[in-house]
Amino acid sequence: MSNFHLRGTGQEDHSLLNEDQVVVKKRLEHASRWRPRLTSCRCWTIAALLAAFWLTFFGLWLYFSYFRDAGGAAGSGAVGRNVKADLVVLPQDLADATGAYCLDGSPPSYYFRNASSEEHHNSWIIHLLGGAWCYNNSECARRSATDLGSSRMLSPKQLFGGILSANFTVNPDFYDWNVAVVNYCDGASFSGDREDPINYNNTKMYYRGSRVLDAVISYLLQSAGLQRADRVILSGASAGALAVYLHADRVSSMVPDDASFKAVADGGFFVPEADTSGGNRWENAMKDVYQMQQVEGSLDEDCLLAKGKNKWECFFAQYAYPYVTTPMFVINSAYDRLALKNILGVRCRPTECSKEELRVIGEHRRTFLQRTDQINRYNKDGMFLTSCYDHKQASSDYFWMTYKVAGRTTREAFADWYYERTTTAETRDVDCGSLTCNPTCRGNR
Ligand SMILES: *[C@@H]1O[C@H](CO)[C@@H](O)[C@H](O)[C@H]1NC(C)=O
Ligand SMILES: *[C@@H]1O[C@H](CO)[C@@H](O)[C@H](O)[C@H]1NC(C)=O
Ligand SMILES: *[C@@H]1O[C@H](CO)[C@@H](O)[C@H](O)[C@H]1NC(C)=O
Ligand SMILES: *[C@@H]1O[C@H](CO)[C@@H](O)[C@H](O)[C@H]1NC(C)=O
């Protein structure tokens, strides 16, 4: 219970560095366990020599497995370890040509790591990062001075885990693919399409997320080899996963026709529902985003047409989903931590919830399963619906490798669906029912 933490979304991406420290600790423990035996045979010299050898070996290991990586040996082709991706900021003139700007007017950007094998030279994962939304001009102005609203302050390299990892053990199916991780800098799930800039409190801002996405895809096509792609996976987490529901078909229409194109949306199926105070705070806030950023222009035309007066509904996963023609894999928790906290307003720790809180949470799961039931109608799609009190799970090593539903990890379930190794029925995983039922979920403890 005491090791329960609310981990920030950014931290999860650095889980591998933390695991390195665990390995270091284990090695030190291992070394100290050996010493007594050596003492008992009184071979002090041998012990000293061994210790020296150990330290040298250990130092070299540390250097090669960590510091060199941190220093940037990207693209060196090593299979065993993860490799950082390099920041690419689009040229200013390209951004100017289409008006594709982050909130603060800086150009769009992404992190790139080259494919490490000949076989997957033309295989691509394009991942859309998340980071919630800004709901009014004031919030967006604040965001525009951060990594979530600007490309000016991003670190030149970054490590990504799970489906984006270059470590074969973590990610045996995709470790050697080209990876482009698109930075989220518009505050509206890559969906704003507002012509006029906003002037707020002496800050000039742009609501142009839709153009940001288009500009990055165009740039990848023209300058990074995406036009030769034979396989493309569009992936996204959280607000980036909502963008996958909203824009997968558009991205699909941009990549080469003969490329296989599939999508995975991880933790973006947020269900609008009443919160514990009886209001619809989140739903209303998202309607504000829809208006403020003029999202309509980037949404699916068939959906907009069908919704008539309620066009804003097409900005929510549950309404946008049936219009998506791209094959989709939906990864989502029925007890998504951020949904429970920020949409429902239930903030108890899983093992400490009151009866009433558990009732509300259970009701939420039922609603969530009703809304996601439509996925069963589409043979092209698969789903992995968990009961873990956490948020997004494909780009974190732990959830990708360890968390299981019906005996399969997230990684196995996704790869089986992706490579069509299983029947349609087998690509529809729904976890056990209660908030603490799955022992492989560490967020529930
Ligand atoms: C690759 O990932 C596995 C599983 O997390 C880890 O045990 C191993 O140390 C990693 N390999 C390298 C070279 O970092
Ligand atoms: C990626 O790999 C290809 C072929 O190995 C090479 O031509 C290209 O320059 C590499 N790109 C980067 C950015 O490293
Ligand atoms: C903007 O939204 C935040 C949170 O939703 C709220 O606290 C704040 O009062 C709003 N600001 C304005 C100027 O509406
Ligand atoms: C306006 O900007 C200033 C400084 O940039 C900031 O301290 C203040 O909170 C902002 N006001 C609003 C209403 O956003």
Image: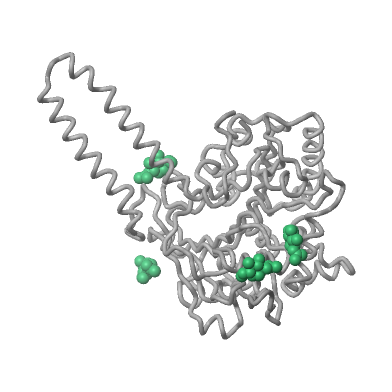
User: Can the viewer see residue 289?
Assistant: no
Place of residue 312 in the rendered image (x, y in percent of width and height, measured from the top left):
81, 65
Q: Write the residue at 53% across / 37% down.
A: 402
- The number of discs equals 0
Q: Quadrant of ligand 2?
A: bottom left
In the displayed structure, 409 sits above or below 268; it is: above
- In the picture, which quadrant includes the C terminus? top right
Rendering colour mode: one colour
Place of residue 240 in the rendered image (x, y in percent of width and height, measured from the top left):
63, 59
Q: In which quarter of the image is residue 441?
A: top right
Q: Quadrant of residue 25?
A: top left
Residues 228 and 43: in front is: 43
Q: Residue furthest right?
A: 309
Residues 281 and 358: in front is: 281
Q: Residue furthest top?
A: 40
In the displayed structure, 111 sits above or below 365; it is: below
Place of residue 42 in the rendered image (x, y in percent of width and height, measured from the top left):
13, 16
Asked whether, in this view, residue 7 is left or right of residue 334, the answer is: left
User: Can the viewer see residue 262?
Assistant: yes
Q: In which quarter of the image is residue 251?
A: bottom right
Asked whether, in this view, residue 406 is left or right of residue 11, the answer is: right
Residues 203 and 436: in front is: 203
Q: Write the residue at 83% across / 67% down.
A: 311
Place of residue 109 in the rendered image (x, y in percent of width and height, measured from the top left):
51, 70
- In the picture, which quadrant includes the N terminus? top right
Asked whether, in this view, residue 316 is left or right of residue 209, the answer is: right
Residues 108 and 334: in front is: 108
In the displayed structure, 309 sits above or below 357; it is: below
